[in-house]
Amino acid sequence: MMRISTILVSIAFATMLQTTQAAIFPEAQVGIKIPLTQKPSTRPMTVAYIPSLKRYYIADGGLAPMGSETEAPISKSQIHAYDDEGKYVNSAKPGYDNRSIYYNSNSNKLETITYNISSFGGFSPNTGIFSIDLTETGEVKDTSSDVFGFNPAFGDANTMPSYNAEKNLYYAKQGRSNKVLVVDLKAREQIAEINLDLTKAGVAFDDVSDFFVAYTGIKGEELELLDIDHKAVLVFDLTGKFIGKSELPKDLKLRSHNHLNGAGYANDMLFVYHESEGEFGTYYGFKVQKAN
């Protein structure tokens, strides 16, 4: 009788485990490919999507704001718009050293977080969170508005935070570590710290994306992390527990800079920049999980 009970418990546990991980695709599915037809002004950083406009936005970053006696300090890094089939629409230069671009469904604005939002790297102009102006049909404009200034709670100057619109929180991955700081703009210190269980995932901190972790909005599978060295996407919950992984195509050539940029999460897809494909590289949007 005890043996039967043990078997039943084992079956129940295995079934529960399968159910827990059933939403993660063993192999990531390509949802869209966006060939860059406009040469990046610097390094492609992250990707946003606005459903009502059916537009993707790719933000470049890496050029600090520079000014002169006659010019205001602005960055030459651009933001590029593409339609929902991956076709180029237009580019503009709002003037920011972008790190993370996202659609804020609370404000109905396209927003960007700049390099050094924490001021960890010292004070610099045009630093913080800004909303990017768009035309009625979704083209990017050179103009923008202030949203929020610097906040030390974001930690690392290079972080590329992802946004949780439901709770109005940010998840800021810290460089060369498993740490993710949870930020509420109303506080000057992080309200929580998530330690991703990289050991359980079978990776080291230098295998994965240095500064970006995606927020998915999927309960129990909220965070996705790009594993560059093993070509996979790792999934964690908000406690940092490792949930599962999804394999990326083995012929995808990822390079060292993929640790630092060329990421993003938009339209329920994790975006990865594949520099060697096309004249200026190609962004792949991978479906890793079945959306709830």
Image (cartoon, rainbow, N blue to C red):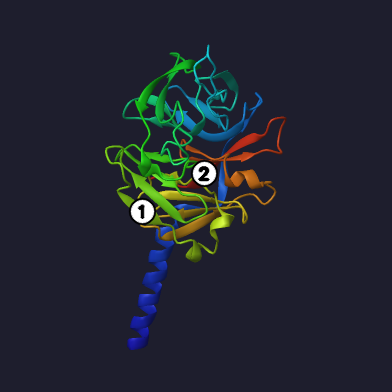
Above or below for 78 versus 235? above
Q: Residues within 10 Å of mark 1 (few under 14, many from 20)?
A: some
Q: Which residue is at the front of the view, 143 or 227?
A: 143
- Report the mark closest to the observer, 1 or 2: 1
Residue at 56% x, 45% y is 29
- Regarding residue 291, the answer to whether it shows in the image is no
The image quarter containing residue 164 is top left
Q: Which residue is at the front of the view, 70 or 44?
A: 70
Q: Which mark is residue 264?
A: none
Q: Which residue is at the front of the view, 52 or 79?
A: 79
Give the image location of residue 126, x and y in percent. Answer: 45, 26
* N-term mark: 1 or 2: 1
* Horizontal arrangement in the rendering, residue 128 relative to residue 70 (left or right): left
* Secondary structure of residue under mark 1: strand
Residue holding disc 1? 193
What amino acid is labelled 2 in the image? Lys
Above or below for 59 versus 255? above
* Horizontal arrangement in the rendering, residue 292 relative to residue 94 (left or right): left
Q: Quadrant of the C terminus?
A: top left
* Secondary structure of residue under mark 2: strand
Q: Which mark is residue 287?
A: 2
Above or below for 214 versus 76? below
Q: Which residue is at the far left?
A: 186
Give the image location of residue 78, x and y in percent. Answer: 56, 24
Give the image location of residue 257, x and y in percent. Answer: 63, 43
What amino acid is labelled 1 in the image? Glu
Residue at 36% x, 57% y is 239
Q: Residues within 10 Å of mark 2 (few under 14, many from 20)?
A: many
Q: Which residue is at the far front?
A: 69
Give the image location of residue 222, x and y in percent. Answer: 39, 49
Say if mark 1 contacts mark 2, CB within 8 Å: no
